[in-house]
C-alpha cells in the first residue's frame, strides 16, 4: 500500500496501546464507533486481520504485531522530526520527576534517561524509586512507570512492551538443598515473596507449581531487596530476567517454563497536554522503552 491514511494508523496504534476500543477512543479523543470504523478501514486497505477479540480485550494477530512495530517506528520518527523542526529539544528547561519501582529505577531507567539527557540537556531528570502508585495524583511525580494500568480518569497511560519474569535461586542454595527437577519440587522449597502474594500464587499455579502461603518464608515489597535475598541464598524468588542476566551466583529454575509477563505502563497526568518538557520526556521514554524491547533489552 503506497498511500495510507495516517489517522487509521494512529487509531490502530492507540488500540494496541490501550488494549480496548473504548480506552483507545478516550486516548485520542474519538468516539468508539469512529475508531472502530478506522480500524476496519485499515484492515480492508491492507487485506489483513489485525485484532482478535479475547473476552473484553483485543489481541493482536501475527500480522497486527508486525504492523505495530513499524507504526511505532513511524510515530517515533515523526516525533523526532517535530523536535528538530521546532528546535524545542535544546530550549525546553526544567525538572521532570520520574517514579518507578526500585529495580526499574536501578536497571532500566539509567541508560534511557542518559539518551534523553543528550537530546534535551536543559531538562533535569529526577528519579524517585518507590512502589507507591498514588504519587502522580499527589503531584509528587510527573511521570511514572508502573506494572498496573491506572484507573484514575485524570491519568494518561500507554502500555509499553512487557518484561519477562522467571524463578531464580542462588547456586550455593541449590548446591545445599538440591536442584528441582520438576515444578512440584519447587513448591516445597523456601520461597521469597511479597506482602500480597495471591497474584504470584496464581501465576505459578498456572505453570504447575502449587505454591502455598506457608512456604513463603520471606516477604518484602521491594523487588530489589527480594532479588538480594535470592542472591544471598535465602530462598527462591521471582526476578526480572533483564536484571538477573547481569548477576553472578544465581541460576534460573525451569528455564523452559513459560515466563511470567510483567506489564509496563507509562503513566502521566493530563498536564502532559500543557507542559512541553513533560511531553518531551514522556514521548522519548516511550520510544526508548519500545526500542529497548526490539533490541532485546
Image (spheres, helix red, strand yellow):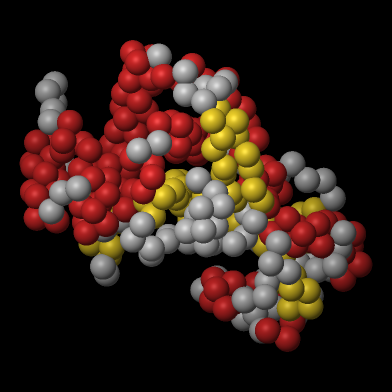
When the figure is inspected, residue 123 is found, relative to residue 19, above or below; the finding is above
Residue at point 20% right, 43% down? 11
Judge by depth and name the residue closer to the eye, 53 or 139: 139
Q: Quadrant of the C terminus?
A: top right
Report if residue 164 is visible in the image: no
| Residue 74 placement, left or right of 129 | left
Judge by depth and name the residue closer to the eye, 44 or 142: 142
Report if residue 238 is visible in the image: yes
Residue at point 40% right, 36% down? 275
Residue at point 79% right, 78% down? 217
Residue 274's quadrant in the figure?
A: top left
- Measuring from the top left, give residue 113's x and y in whole percent: 59, 32
Judge by depth and name the residue closer to the eye, 239 or 112: 112
Judge by depth and name the residue closer to the eye, 241 or 282: 282
Q: Quadrant of the N terminus?
A: top left
- Measuring from the top left, give residue 128's x and y in whole percent: 64, 48
| Residue 97 placement, left or right of 84 | right
- Measuring from the top left, give residue 135's x and y in whole percent: 55, 57
| Residue 207 placement, left or right of 214 | left
- Measuring from the top left, give residue 234's x and y in whole percent: 85, 67
Residue at point 87% right, 71% down? 177
Amino acid at each position: 500500500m503506497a498511500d495510507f491514511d495516517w489517522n487509521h494508523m494512529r487509531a490502530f496504534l492507540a488500540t494496541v496501546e490501550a488494549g480496548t476500543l473504548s480506552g483507545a477512543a478516550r486516548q485520542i479523543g474519538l468516539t468508539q464507533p469512529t475508531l472502530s470504523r478506522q480500524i476496519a478501514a485499515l484492515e480492508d486497505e491492507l487485506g489483513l486481520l489485525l485484532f482478535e477479540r479475547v473476552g473484553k480485550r483485543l489481541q493482536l494477530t501475527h500480522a497486527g504485531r508486525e504492523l505495530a512495530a513499524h507504526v511505532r517506528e513511524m510515530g517515533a520518527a515523526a516525533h523526532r522530526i517535530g523536535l528538530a523542526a521546532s528546535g524545542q529539544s535544546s530550549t525546553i528547561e526544567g525538572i521532570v520527576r520520574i517514579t518507578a519501582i526500585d529495580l526499574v529505577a536501578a536497571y532500566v531507567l539509567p541508560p534511557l534517561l542518559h539518551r534523553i539527557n543528550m537530546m534535551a540537556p536543559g531538562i533535569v531528570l529526577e528519579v524517585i524509586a518507590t512502589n507507591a502508585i498514588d504519587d502522580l495524583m499527589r503531584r509528587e511525580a510527573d511521570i511514572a512507570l508502573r506494572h498496573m494500568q491506572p484507573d484514575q480518569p485524570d491519568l494518561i497511560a500507554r502500555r509499553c512492551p512487557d518484561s519477562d519474569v522467571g524463578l531464580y535461586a542462588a547456586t550455593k542454595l541449590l548446591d545445599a538443598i538440591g536442584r528441582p527437577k520438576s515444578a512440584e519440587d519447587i513448591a516445597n522449597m523456601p520461597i521469597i515473596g511479597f506482602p500480597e502474594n495471591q497474584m504470584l500464587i496464581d501465576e505459578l499455579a498456572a505453570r504447575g507449581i502449587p505454591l502455598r502461603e506457608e512456604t513463603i518464608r520471606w516477604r518484602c515489597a521491594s523487588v530489589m531487596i527480594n532479588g538480594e535475598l535470592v542472591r544471598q541464598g535465602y530462598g527462591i524468588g521471582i526476578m526480572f530476567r533483564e536484571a538477573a542476566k547481569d548477576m553472578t551466583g544465581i541460576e534460573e529454575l525451569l528455564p523452559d517454563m513459560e515466563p511470567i509477563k510483567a506489564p509496563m505502563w507509562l503513566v502521566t497526568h493530563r498536564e502532559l497536554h500543557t507542559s512541553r518538557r513533560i511531553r518531551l520526556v514522556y514521548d522519548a521514554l516511550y520510544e526508548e522503552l519500545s526500542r529497548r524491547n526490539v533490541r532485546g533489552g
